[in-house]
Amino acid sequence: MRIPLFSCLFLIFICFCLSMSAGQKDKHCVDWVGNQQSLLLQWKNSVVFDNASSTKLVHWNQNVNCCLWEGVICSGGGCVIGLDLTNESISGWLDDNSSLPSLLHWGLASNKLKTFPHFLRDQSTLLALDLSNNEIHGEIPNWIWNLSHLYSLNLSYNYLTTLDLPLLGMSSLGVLDLHSNQLQGQLLAFPEHATYLDFSRNNFSSVTPPSIGNFTSFLSLSSNKFYGSIPESICNATSLRLLDLSNNSLSGMVPRCLFKMSKFQYDWDQGLRVLSLRKNNLIGAISDSFPRNCSLQTLNLNDNQLEGKLPKSLARCTSLEVLDLGNNRIEDVFPCYLKNISMLHVLVLRSNQFYGPINCPGPNASWSMLQIVDLAANNFTDKLPIKNFSDWKAITDERNEAQYQLSPIRFEDNFPFSSLPTGEAVLPYNYRDVVKFYYQNMVTITIKGVQVELVKILTIFTSLDFSCNSFDGPIPSELGELKSLRFLNLSHNAFTGHISPSLGKLTNLESLDLSSNKFTGEISVQLAEGLHFLSFLNLSFNQLGGEIPNIKQFATFSESSYEGNIGLCGFPLKEKCTHEEPPSSPPTSKDFGKRIDWNFLSSELGFIFGFGIVIGALMFRKRWRICYFKFVDKIFFNMFPQFYIRIENRGRRAHRNQKQGY
Ligand SMILES: *[C@@H]1O[C@H](CO)[C@@H](O)[C@H](O)[C@H]1NC(C)=O
Ligand SMILES: *[C@@H]1O[C@H](CO)[C@@H](O)[C@H](O)[C@H]1NC(C)=O
Ligand SMILES: *[C@@H]1O[C@H](CO)[C@@H](O)[C@H](O)[C@H]1NC(C)=O
Ligand SMILES: *[C@@H]1O[C@H](CO)[C@@H](O)[C@H](O)[C@H]1NC(C)=O
Ligand SMILES: *[C@@H]1O[C@H](CO)[C@@H](O)[C@H](O)[C@H]1NC(C)=O
Ligand SMILES: *[C@@H]1O[C@H](CO)[C@@H](O)[C@H](O)[C@H]1NC(C)=O
Ligand SMILES: *[C@@H]1O[C@H](CO)[C@@H](O)[C@H](O)[C@H]1NC(C)=O
Ligand SMILES: *[C@@H]1O[C@H](CO)[C@@H](O)[C@H](O)[C@H]1NC(C)=O
Ligand SMILES: *[C@@H]1O[C@H](CO)[C@@H](O)[C@H](O)[C@H]1NC(C)=O
Ligand SMILES: *[C@@H]1O[C@H](CO)[C@@H](O)[C@H](O)[C@H]1NC(C)=O
Ligand SMILES: *[C@@H]1O[C@H](CO)[C@@H](O)[C@H](O)[C@H]1NC(C)=O
Ligand SMILES: *[C@@H]1O[C@H](CO)[C@@H](O)[C@H](O)[C@H]1NC(C)=O
């Protein structure tokens, strides 16, 4: 999932060089074209690397033309213009000054370098440098900014701590990726001409620099310690396509103009597409300023203190795929007017103050792509109108394994190379090609009682969470048609009636939570037989009775899955089922009502009471914690490695596939 930026640069070089090869000589390698092979071999001898894991360097030899060596990039004219020595276990050089004539590209990602290669300071024609994913500590040397042609610099995934900020402001870089280092201090300015700036996952402690270049398309400052308010001047950056300020300490109101930036005007001015401000301390209402032709695909405002109503103009954002407004204080009815957004995959309204029914009048829903719906911890009431909500195409279609592999929601954008700074022509600046990059959406959801951060949203990840509301009535039987559903949480509502055996048709279900409702009757055998993949079950605190089916997955759950029901018996509960009754007349729920064990009930009440006191303190801030707290001791770190998720549980944290999560 790497951004194929450099491969695109290669493409450009190659095109460039092909155009040059028509009789013309490559100007910049005239001085070494005769002996480049021997210079490369000489240089190789000074490289310290592990030949056991090398796949390129190790094969370089005199008998083959060097342009055919792995890792060597040549122009059409047979001139070496770059080296791509990614993942070669290079740890340094015997002679740090042994150099080659200046190249355009140096790819040294994923090696074992501990310092910046000294010889690079003489590479005056260098255009693209990739030192990402090494072990470089300390400061970014100042000579980097003296490389006057450098367009793209990738230093991500190192241990860098300092950066000379005035020089950064003056640099002419177009692409600067510094994410996942330990850079700290104030950030005062951005490189003026940059199109792509990634400062995320560092330790910057600063206000947001007020001026953002007019060329900047991608800007991520996420997971630092930026504070203060979001400057209005950010809206001067008319090229912004992605703005990620998430997971900082930003405060104040969201500038009104920021939402206006999401205006699609022309093919070459497509407006803001991704706006993530999650995990900050922003206040105030979301301003009603989404423009016509709204271009937003992702709007993530989760975990702030936003209040007021949801603006109606949001309905103009008909390209929205991810809408995450969870953990705020929005007080409104269910936004039926968003139904026209047919691309919506993720709808999170969790833990706000939404109220009333979610039954939208009018023609049936066009939300057919919905795969994650989280309405938990609001004040929604009335029946659950599953059919009216969506036709659930994304959840009813059974998919094959091939489709399971790779379909993250992704974001692509184009960087016109015409925005390169002008100067002595090293590259053909008029070459109009594009670079694509991914944006991995990150969404927080709660499954199996644990807060989970989905770093990649694969389309097979399907979850419905309606918990902690006041929904009532029976479970709609149509729920059984959502065959690809994996997580279902209806807990802490007022649902009544039997647990429909049709839920047994949800053969992909991994987690089912129906606790703290008013379900009656028995647990049907069809249910237990159908749910092959169930690894989490909670039926506690209902009014269920009868014998627990001790088959399939149902034989693996513990007592806590069933506690607090008045009439359940059999394994794993201590209550033995009494089989004296004639089997011809199976007990009805009424019969169980007569058999209430008052001792049992009062001890349960004691438990609930004690529990209530413990969580009482937590309730003051966020209501959803009731649901959250209940399972805090059940942590499933190894749930679904295939989803590349990170599980966050307050202080405790487990990382999976960390490198892949953006
Ligand atoms: C920088 O390198 C990292 C790791 O090698 C990669 O994931 C990222 O996409 C690169 N950034 C750019 C802008 O190409
Ligand atoms: C590394 O390669 C060189 C030359 O190809 C060889 O002489 C040497 O034995 C190799 N070392 C190891 C550890 O394989
Ligand atoms: C890097 O090289 C190691 C062997 O040294 C190999 O196992 C690994 O898959 C390579 N990684 C990539 C991204 O090519
Ligand atoms: C490389 O050059 C630097 C100064 O340019 C010098 O300090 C250093 O000693 C040289 N290193 C070697 C191995 O010759
Ligand atoms: C950068 O270049 C300027 C002049 O072009 C020079 O004065 C300065 O010393 C150089 N800085 C470094 C760190 O090489
Ligand atoms: C972050 O920066 C602060 C100083 O601003 C420092 O005390 C702290 O150790 C740094 N944290 C990391 C993880 O580098
Ligand atoms: C930024 O670009 C837009 C459109 O190209 C232009 O209208 C605006 O004046 C520019 N602003 C600055 C500060 O250069
Ligand atoms: C938020 O940022 C902190 C560092 O400031 C980091 O440790 C944490 O992993 C980030 N959380 C997320 C969800 O990105
Ligand atoms: C940037 O925005 C601010 C306020 O929003 C405005 O006063 C200023 O003139 C703008 N600057 C440029 C260069 O457009
Ligand atoms: C919306 O975008 C179209 C191009 O797709 C453009 O023709 C139209 O003028 C835009 N409308 C507004 C109000 O900007
Ligand atoms: C939804 O779209 C239909 C036709 O595309 C339109 O008639 C209707 O007014 C729209 N509804 C809303 C709430 O915007
Ligand atoms: C929402 O529920 C909370 C707690 O259940 C209650 O205090 C509040 O009054 C309710 N708000 C509305 C608007 O119904």
Image: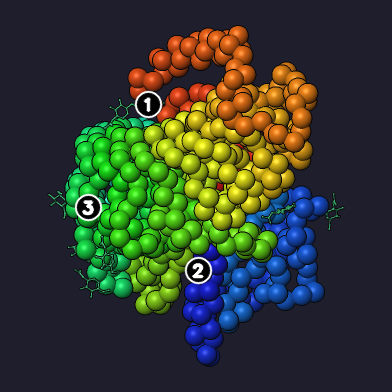
User: Few, some or many C-alpha atoms within 10 Å of disc 3 (few <14, some 14-19, many ≥20)?
Assistant: some
Instruction: Say if 607 sits above or below 244 in the image.
Output: above
Which residue is drawn at the image coordinates 77% and 30% (left, top)? Answer: 582
Taking the image as shown, residue 641 lies to the left or right of residue 106, namely right
Which residue is drawn at the image coordinates 39% and 66% (left, top)? Answer: 415
State yes or no: Cβ of the residue under disc 2 lies below 8 Å from any atom of ligand 1: no
Which numbered mark, 2 or 1, is in the foreground of this view? 1
Q: Amino acid at mark 2?
A: Leu
State yes or no: Cβ of the residue under disc 1 lies below 8 Å from any atom of ligand 12: no
Between the residue at mark 2 and the residue at mark 3, the CA separation in whole angstroms equals 43 Å
Kindly identify which residue carries mark 1.
622
Taking the image as shown, residue 502 lies to the left or right of residue 517, namely right
Q: Amino acid at mark 1?
A: Lys
N-terminal of the two: label 2 or label 1? Answer: 2
Between the residue at mark 2 and the residue at mark 1, the CA separation in whole angstroms equals 49 Å
Helix, strand or loop under label 2:
helix
Kindly identify which residue carries mark 3.
312
Instruction: Say if 623 sits above or below 60 in the image.
Output: above
Residue 253 versus residue 626: which sits nearer the camera?
Answer: 626
Taking the image as shown, residue 170 lies to the left or right of residue 117, namely left
Q: Percent x, y for residue 285?
A: 21, 40
Which numbered mark, 2 or 3, is in the foreground of this view? 3
Dots 2, 1 in contact, CB < 8 A: no
Q: Amino acid at mark 3?
A: Lys
Helix, strand or loop under label 1:
loop
